[in-house]
Amino acid sequence: MDNDRINQIIEKHQCEASSLIQVMLEIQSIYHWLPKEALELVSDKLKVPLTRIQHIATFYKAFSLVPKGRHGIHICMGTACHVRGAGRILDSVQDLTGIKPGETDLDMKFSLETVNCLGCCALGPVMEINGKTHGKMAPAKTADVLKNYD
């Protein structure tokens, strides 16, 4: 962990406790998770109890207290995607990556999550990687999509 980089993020927000979530989001975007050492530094600099920071980190799904892969895969399991075969997309991604929802592969390349809705039901079934939506997915297309992420 780079303490100088964490300190720069905190100072960019004038060490304001009201910027806590933004600081946490920036740390998450750099490391793909929130290392405990980083949260301890944030707690000290922003004068926010570590327990409050951990509560926020566990409340919001955007945060992770465990290492995540460089590429976050989200498979929509909402009704529209489900009836159009989202389960088969999930099975295909699991077969290709070797991980189940909530897991990260050993190379720290992919993390897999299922979500209830990505808000683009007309494109279902939908797979999102790093915020990029891949719609009208079919099991045969998943390998082609995944190979674009190194």
Image (cartoon, rainbow, N blue to C red):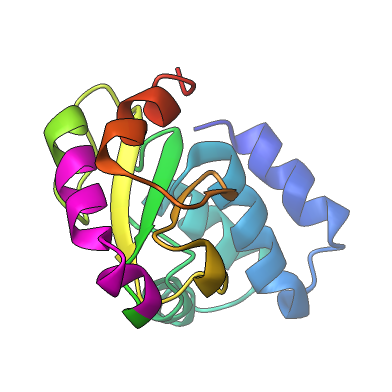
Q: Position of residue 98 (x, y in %)?
A: 12, 33
Is the residue 2 above or below the residue 12 in the image?
above
Disc count in the image?
Answer: 0
Q: Position of residue 20 (x, y in %)?
A: 66, 71
Overall secondary structure of the magenta section? helix
* Residue 82 falls in image quadrant: bottom left
Q: Position of residue 105 (x, y in %)?
A: 21, 32
Instruction: Answer left or right for 148 relative to 46.
Output: left
Instruction: Answer left or right for 88 relative to 129.
Output: left
Q: Position of residue 99 (x, y in %)?
A: 15, 40
* Residue 104 falls in image quadrant: top left
Instruction: Answer left or right for 88 relative to 19.
Output: left
Is the residue 148 above or below the residue 18 in the image?
above
Quadrant location of the C terminus in the rendered image: top left
Q: At 49% across and 33% down in the image, what residue appears? A: 1
Q: Which residues are magenta?
A: 80-93
Q: At 40% across and 73% down in the image, what residue appears? A: 54
Is the residue 59 above or below the residue 32 in the image?
below
103 drawn magenta: no
- Regarding residue 112, the answer to whether it shows in the image is yes
Instruction: Answer left or right for 98 relative to 26.
Output: left
- Regarding residue 66, the answer to whether it shows in the image is no
Is the residue 133 above or below the residue 139 in the image?
below
